[in-house]
Image: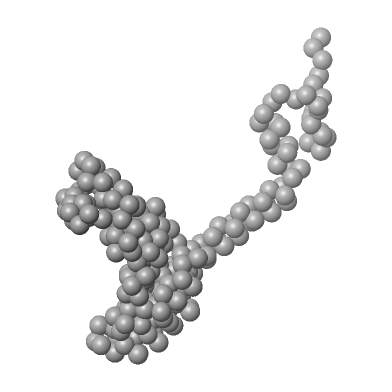
């Protein structure tokens, strides 16, 4: 005679070694339902937090762009003093954004345009350490231009070298190397300039090879 099966006690713990995955999952959820609910709630809160951060960041970027646009308007209308105040405001409030970094470049350039090279250099030097990778090369190029304005060509060559190392393309790198070589030549460092001019002249496909050859020829003809 067949044995009568005993009903399963739903409150009894799952026997050790059970290999029924559906039964295991069901019993675990029954025993830990509150924990699962908490887990779902935590995930939901994290998701809302991430969305909030992204929304806040997008709003900050938009506000920074609007402020930069207003400052540029004053700059292009020749209102240098008003533009500088506005650009400094963008830097102070939104310095970590791309608009804030663009404001640094524009503010420094406005000083260079007025012949105030020391002031522009100071602005760039202060912002350079915290600059993003996409703006560091631009800041280095502008710093080099500032030092050229002061006739400090050796220092300008250093910043062109830094810009070349951070360049995002071969053509951009070659442009900075050519500017570096020109600054070295003007600083009287002919041997170093010749090395760079020669590298560019012999580089296949470089848009700066021809000018490098001309500059190299000038150095050779002058006996330097």
x and y percent of residue 194 in the render?
28, 51
Figure disc tally: 0
Nearest the camera: 35 or 154?
154
Which residue is rendered at x = 78% and y = 24% of the image? 17
x and y percent of residue 98 in the render?
40, 67
The answer to whether residue 134 is visible is: no
Which image quadrant is residue 89 in?
bottom left
Nearest the camera: 12 or 114?
114
x and y percent of residue 109 in the render?
33, 76
Question: Where is 21 relative to 168, above or below?
Answer: above
Question: Where is 193 relative to 96, above or below?
Answer: above
For the N terminus, the image quarter is: top right
Question: Where is 27 relative to 109, above or below?
Answer: above
Which residue is rendered at x = 26% and y = 46% of the image? 198
For the C terminus, the image quarter is: bottom left
Which residue is rendered at x = 37% and y = 70% of the image? 152
Nearest the camera: 219 or 65?
219
Which image quadrant is residue 27 in?
top right
Question: Where is 133 relative to 206, above or below?
Answer: below
Which image quadrant is residue 69 in?
bottom left
The answer to whether residue 30 is visible is: yes
x and y percent of residue 65 in the render?
36, 74
Image side of residue 205 versus residue 24, left or right: left
Which residue is rendered at x = 22% and y = 46% of the image? 201
């Amino acid at each position: 005679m067949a044995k009568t099966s005993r009903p399963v006690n739903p409150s009894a713990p799952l026997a050790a070694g059970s290999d029924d995955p559906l039964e295991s999952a069901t019993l675990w959820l029954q025993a830990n339902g509150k924990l699962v609910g908490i887990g779902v709630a935590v995930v939901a809160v994290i998701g809302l937090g991430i969305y909030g951060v992204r929304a806040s960041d997008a709003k900050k970027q938009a506000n920074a762009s609007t402020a930069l646009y207003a400052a540029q308007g004053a700059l292009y209308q020749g209102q240098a003093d008003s533009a500088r105040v506005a650009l400094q405001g963008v830097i102070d409030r939104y310095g970590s954004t791309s608009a804030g970094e663009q404001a640094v470049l524009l503010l420094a350039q406005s000083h260079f345009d007025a012949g105030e090279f020391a002031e522009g250099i100071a602005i760039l030097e202060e912002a350079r350490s915290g600059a993003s990778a996409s703006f560091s090369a631009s800041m280095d190029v502008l710093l080099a231009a500032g030092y050229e304005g002061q006739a400090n060509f050796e220092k300008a060559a250093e910043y062109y070298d830094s810009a070349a190392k951070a360049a995002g393309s071969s053509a951009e790198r070659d442009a900075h190397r050519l500017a570096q070589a020109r600054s070295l030549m003007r600083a009287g460092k002919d041997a170093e300039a010749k090395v760079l001019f020669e590298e560019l002249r012999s580089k296949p496909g470089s848009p700066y090879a021809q000018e490098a050859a001309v500059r190299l020829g000038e150095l050779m003809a002058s006996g330097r």
